[in-house]
Amino acid sequence: MVRPVTWYSDDLGDRDPVAAMLDTCERLRALVGGWPAARFERSYEPGKWTVRQILTHLAQTEIALGYRIRMALASSDYAAQNFSQDHWLSRETALNAVDALEALFALNRMNRTLCGSLSDADRAVGLTHPEYGALTVDWIIHQLAGHQIHHLRQLEQLG
């Protein structure tokens, strides 16, 4: 199977995406697991999202991309819908960082388990996206894994 090129291919490199999903969550847990509440309100760079917002965004992305995978596998001719990450994030301001982190871990476990069980034929299932055009389930898996690594690197700057 040819490795798909996503927005986050450079972040993922040649790693297996399902293994990378597990590694990223373990590294996140080790990095931020014991932080005090105030530290989650810091940003890695002025004008960028706080740690709490990044964790919320990562959990929301697990929801969105996990849904797309499931819909593509369960529907013929599935067309994904756009979503605005900023609008989604603006609706979750009451969620604290610890709850966002736990949601991320649970959703990641579900998505990782599903993705790890898929055959090459399952991963080759196609879908369309209004901005990105024709995609496959494998593309989404690689996108999800690379996206997590991208944000982990931002959080590691706060170490």
Image: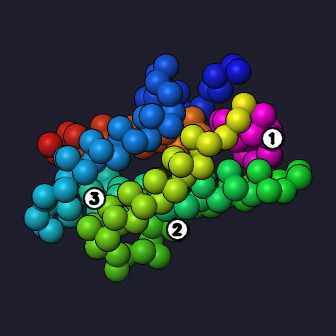
Quadrant of image for the N terminus: top right
Q: Which mark is residue 66?
A: none
Q: Is residue 44 magenta?
A: no
Q: Position of residue 120 (x, y in %)?
A: 72, 31
> Measuring 14% from the left and 43% from the top, which residue is drawn there?
159
Q: Position of residue 8 (x, y in %)?
A: 51, 33
Q: Position of residue 98 (x, y in %)?
A: 26, 67
Which segment is the magenta one?
Answer: 121-140
Crowdedness near tag 2: few (<14), some (14–19) or many (≥20) residues, C-alpha within 10 Å: few
Residue that carries the numbered disc 1 in the rendered image: 126
The label nearer to you, 1 versus 2, is 1
Residue that carries the numbered disc 3 in the rendered image: 50
Q: CA distance from mark 1 to mark 2?
A: 27 Å
Left of 17 or right of it: where is 33?
Answer: left
- Amino acid bearing label 3: Thr
Can residue 44 be seen?
Answer: no
Residue that carries the numbered disc 2 in the rendered image: 87
